[in-house]
């Protein structure tokens, strides 16, 4: 026999099993499960505000000093944020705005985004925040202007 000859065809047998077919789509998550992540984030934020409300940042020694302020004497956009959170947690909105107006604006943005997250999660839709880069640059520019103005003599009302 010739070595280049092809082997004999295999004997017919049972066809291989095709399997159970495509898997069914996963069952939708329950509403409680969909709301677990927003609830967990809210619990962490409430815990952090509760801690800052209980441990007064106006008394020295409780929190570390801002390194930028300590080494340069310049207020960063976050300087006064803990004092702002403390006043906000105690319901004193004017003092919170005086300590750090940008932080108070951040609290409002967080509340709006969190509420949107809860509504979308409750409906079974994901939270997608697709902001164009120009908006992120705009936020950065606003924080930069806020930082510069609060360090100038005419912007002392924005300093903590």
Image (cartoon, rainbow, N blue to C red):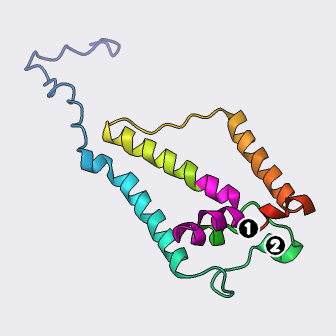
- Quarter placement of the N terminus: top left
The local secondary structure at tag 1 comes to loop
Residue drawn at x 85%, y 59% as measured from the top left: 155
The reply to whether the magenta stretch includes residue 8 is: no
* In magenta segment, residue 100: yes
Measuring from the top left, give residue 98's x and y in whole percent. Answer: 71, 64
Mark 2 crowd level (few <14, some 14–19, many ≥20, 10 Å Cα): few
Residue positioned 37% across, 41% down in the render? 119
Q: What residue occupies the far right of the structure in this picture? A: 153
Q: Which residue is mark 1?
A: 79
Write down the region rendered in magenta.
Answer: 86-106
Using residue 144 as the reference point, say whether residue 7 is left or right of it. Answer: left
Nearer to me, 160 or 39: 160
N-term-proximal mark, 2 vs 1: 2
User: Eyeballing the image, is 28 above or below 52?
Assistant: above
Q: x%, y% of residue 142?
A: 76, 46
Could you tell me which residue is drawn at 24 percent across and 36 percent down?
26
CA neighbours of label 1 inside 10 A, class few (<14), some (14 to 19), many (20+): many
Classify mark 2: helix, strand or loop: helix
In front of the other: 86 or 113: 86
Q: Which quarter of the figure has residue 14?
A: top left
Identify the residue under disc 2: 69
13 sits to left or right of 77: left
Query: Residue 130: x percent and y percent?
Result: 57, 34
Give the dominant element type of the magenta stretch: helix, strand or loop. Answer: helix
- Above/below status of 154 relative to 19: below
In the rendered image, the vertical position of residue 93 relative to residue 51, given as above or below: above
- State the CA–CA distance, disc 2 to disc 1: 8 Å
């Amino acid at each position: 026999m010739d070595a280049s000859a092809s082997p004999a065809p295999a004997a017919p047998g049972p066809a291989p099993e095709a399997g159970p077919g495509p898997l069914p789509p996963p069952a939708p998550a329950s509403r409680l499960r969909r709301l677990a992540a927003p609830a967990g984030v809210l619990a962490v934020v409430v815990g952090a505000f509760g801690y800052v409300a209980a441990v007064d940042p106006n008394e020295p020694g409780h929190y570390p000093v801002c390194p930028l302020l300590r080494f340069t004497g310049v207020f960063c956009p976050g300087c006064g944020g803990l004092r702002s959170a403390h006043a906000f947690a105690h319901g004193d909105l004017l003092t919170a705005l005086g300590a750090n107006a940008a932080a108070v604006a951040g609290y409002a943005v967080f509340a709006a985004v969190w509420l949107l997250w809860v509504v979308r999660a409750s409906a079974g839709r994901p939270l997608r925040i697709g902001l164009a880069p120009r908006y992120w640059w705009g936020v950065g520019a606003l924080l930069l202007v806020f930082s510069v103005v609060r360090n100038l003599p005419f912007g002392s009302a924005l300093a903590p």
